Image (cartoon, helix red, strand yellow):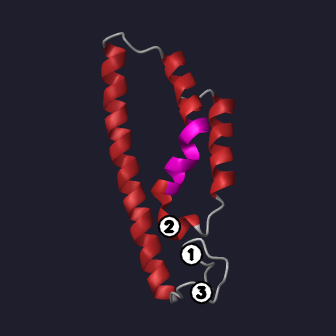
Amino acid sequence: MDQFPPVNGTNDAGQAHQHDSNEWTEALVRTVAHLAAQLTLNQIRLRALATELQEQGVLDQGAVASRVRAIATAEGGGYLRENLGDALVEVIDVETLEHDLVAFLEESGAG
């Protein structure tokens, strides 16, 4: 694939900055590595917080699951766009990904 969709909100491929395959590969690798690092740090922090709250008996798991679903519905798309970065938002169907994320949380009761 020699040409990617336009970036920066333009629909005119002639106006879009052209990237060669190596630039796109490097950008993709950096973005994925950054997202994996962010995800890992957040998982560690959240696991520590949830464990501590649960051990102290102050965590209502049902309320937390409900809050997770509400936040995902209201703010999930914004978080996805922020975490994906400009380059990937242009090539990923973020709306479908957001819908799938919220549907997963609703179906699984996950929190």
Residue 7 in which image quadrant: bottom right
Disc 1: CA contacts within 10 A as few (<14), some (14-19) or many (>=20): some
Residue 7 marker: 1
Q: Which residue does the image show at 36% across and 32% down from the upper left?
A: 47
Disc 3: CA contacts within 10 A as few (<14), some (14-19) or many (>=20): few
Q: Which residue does the image show at 59% across and 71% down from the upper left?
A: 9
Q: Magenta segment range?
A: 72-81
Magenta part, dominant SS: helix
Give the percent coordinates (x, y) of residue 84: 49, 60
Amino acid type shown at disc 2: Asp
Is 71 placed left or right of 12 in the picture? left
Labels 3 & 1 near each other (Cβ < 8 A): no
Amino acid type shown at disc 1: Val
Q: CA distance from mark 1 to mark 2?
A: 8 Å
Which of marks 2 and 3 precedes in the sequence?
3
Residue 15 marker: 3
Is 30 placed left or right of 76 in the picture? left
Vertical comparison of 87 with 82: above or below:
below
Q: Which image quarter holds the N terminus?
A: bottom right
Labels 1 & 2 near each other (Cβ < 8 A): yes
Quick one: SS at disc 1?
loop
Q: CA distance from mark 3 to mark 2?
A: 16 Å
Is 68 placed left or right of 13 in the picture? left
- What residue is disc 2 on? 86
Vertical comparison of 50 with 36: above or below:
above
Vertical comparison of 4 with 108: above or below:
below
**How many labels sit on residues?**
3
